[in-house]
Structure formats: C-alpha cells, structure tokens
Image (spheres, rainbow, N blue to C red):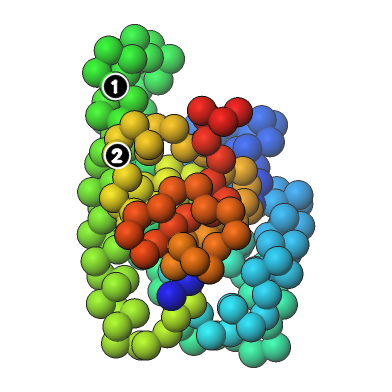
C-alpha cells in the first residue's frame, strides 16, 4: 500500500493579498499559481498512480480545485473519489489568535484549543476516525494506491496517527508547502524515510529539528 498526501495549491488567502474575513474559509479558491502547482504535482504523482487510486478530498473549494488539476493528467477520470468533512482545515475560531498566543505557549501547541475553534489534538481525533473508515474501505476495494488531498494540519495529523508518532515528533514536523507531496509506504520501498514505525515509514516531511 502506498499513500500519497498532498496539501492544496496556493490559495488566494496564502497570497497575502486577500482578506479571509470577507469570504468563508471553505469557499477560498486557488490562486493562478496554485493551479499551476497542482498541475505540476499531477505530473509528479503520475497517471498510473492516479487512475488506480482511492482518492479522498477535503470538501473545501481549494482542495477540490487542486484535485481537479491533479486529475488532468489522466485519460479517463477515476470513479473512486470521496469527499470527507473530517479532512477539513483546522478551525482556529473567530477570536484574536495573536492575543491567545501566551496561553497557547503555556498549555502547549498541540493541546491548546483556540477560542471557538479546535486544537491540533481535536484535528488528530477526527483524522483518526477518518483513518479507521479509510482502512475498511481499502480492505473492501483491494486497491493499493491511496491519495489524500487536504490541508497542512490535517496531513500532519494523518501521518502522526498512521505511524503513531509522539506529540513531540508531531510538533517537529514543518507544515508542508503548497502541493508538497508526502508518501507513506512500506519502509523498504522508500528512499529517504523520515519516521519509521514497524513495517511503515514516511518520506517528504521536513523537520524543524533539521532546519
């Protein structure tokens, strides 16, 4: 089994020229650069992988658009595409995040829940629920290629849950760049594994401790 995880392409909010308070987060679209990033990522992942994959996508506009561009490399569209709200972006609430930073530092980055929003631990819990559902579907479908198109925090939570990483290892992971591809597979099949657990490993993750 090979799992490829990809963060959405650059969105209009990522450009710094867009006011996210005027448009709901789920409706924020890709920038023109983000569209190009997604097209390039599709070429890197490859037609063979995409046509025979179980594909899961966050229901946000920017992830939907990323997947649309990824699939342009394929001759025929795959039918195994599923949207799952559990892959959505972390909810940071509607309070002043800057004013909450001292509390976040006190209680810990992984555990602190933003006012009206989620903590990374909350995101981890729903990602864990998704993983259990996904594995049941993988067993039924007997497919060996899986693609997740989601968000930086969700992606890191999935990696941490799949490999059963510690909180400290989770916090050591950098947020992936837009359209950066992370791969989980059998450790003997990966060239540059970053974390290993049992038979499995992950590559493509960048660590703060190695910056």
Q: Quadrant of the N terminus?
A: bottom left
Residue lying furthest front: 188
| Crowd band around label 2 with a 10 angstrom C-alpha radius: few (<14), some (14–19), many (20+) | few
| Crowd band around label 1 with a 10 angstrom C-alpha radius: few (<14), some (14–19), many (20+) | few
Residue 63 visible to the viewer: no
User: Which residue occupies 33% across, 15% down?
Assistant: 105
Front position in the image: 154 or 166 = 166
Q: Secondary structure at mark 2?
A: loop
- In the image, residue 54 lies at what x, y percent? 45, 78
- In the image, residue 99 lies at what x, y percent? 38, 11
Q: Quadrant of the C terminus?
A: top right
- In the image, residue 78 lies at what x, y percent? 54, 85
Q: Is residue 102 above or below residue 89?
A: above
Q: Is 24 displayed left or right of 99 in the figure?
A: right
Q: Is residue 33 above or below residue 39?
A: above
Front position in the image: 195 or 113 = 195
| Number of marks drawn | 2
Front label number (2 vs 1): 2
Q: Secondary structure at mark 1?
A: loop
User: Which residue occupies 61% across, 43% down?
Assistant: 177
Q: Is residue 66 above or below residue 103?
A: below
Q: Which residue is mark 1?
A: 108
Q: Which residue is mark 2?
A: 166
User: Which residue occupies 76% across, 49% down?
Assistant: 33
The quadrant in which residue 45 appears is bottom right
Q: Specify the label residue 31 is tagged with.
A: none
Q: Is residue 99 above or below residue 175?
A: above
Q: Earlier in the sequence, mark 2 or mark 1?
A: 1
- In the image, residue 6 lies at what x, y percent? 55, 57
User: Which residue occupies 26% across, 56% down?
Assistant: 128
């Amino acid at each position: 089994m090979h799992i490829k995880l990809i963060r959405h392409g650059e969105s209009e909010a990522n450009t710094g020229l867009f006011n996210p308070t005027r448009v709901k987060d789920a409706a924020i679209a890709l920038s023109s650069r983000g569209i190009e990033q997604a097209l390039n990522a599709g070429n890197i992942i490859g037609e063979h992988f995409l046509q025979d994959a179980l594909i899961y996508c966050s229901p946000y506009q920017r992830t939907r658009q990323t997947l649309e561009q990824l699939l342009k490399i394929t001759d025929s569209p795959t039918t195994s595409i599923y949207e799952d709200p559990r892959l959505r972006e972390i909810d940071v609430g509607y309070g002043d995040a800057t004013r909450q930073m001292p509390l976040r530092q006190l209680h810990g980055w992984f555990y602190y829940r933003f006012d009206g929003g989620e903590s990374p631990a909350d995101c981890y819990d729903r990602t864990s629920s998704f993983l259990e559902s996904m594995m049941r579907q993988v067993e039924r479908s007997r497919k060996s290629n899986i693609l997740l198109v989601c968000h930086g925090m969700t992606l890191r939570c999935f990696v941490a849950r799949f490999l059963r990483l510690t909180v400290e290892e989770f916090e050591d992971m950098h947020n992936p760049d837009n359209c950066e591809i992370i791969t989980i597979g059998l450790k003997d099949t990966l060239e540059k594994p970053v974390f290993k657990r049992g038979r499995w490993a992950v590559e493509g993750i960048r660590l703060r401790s190695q910056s």
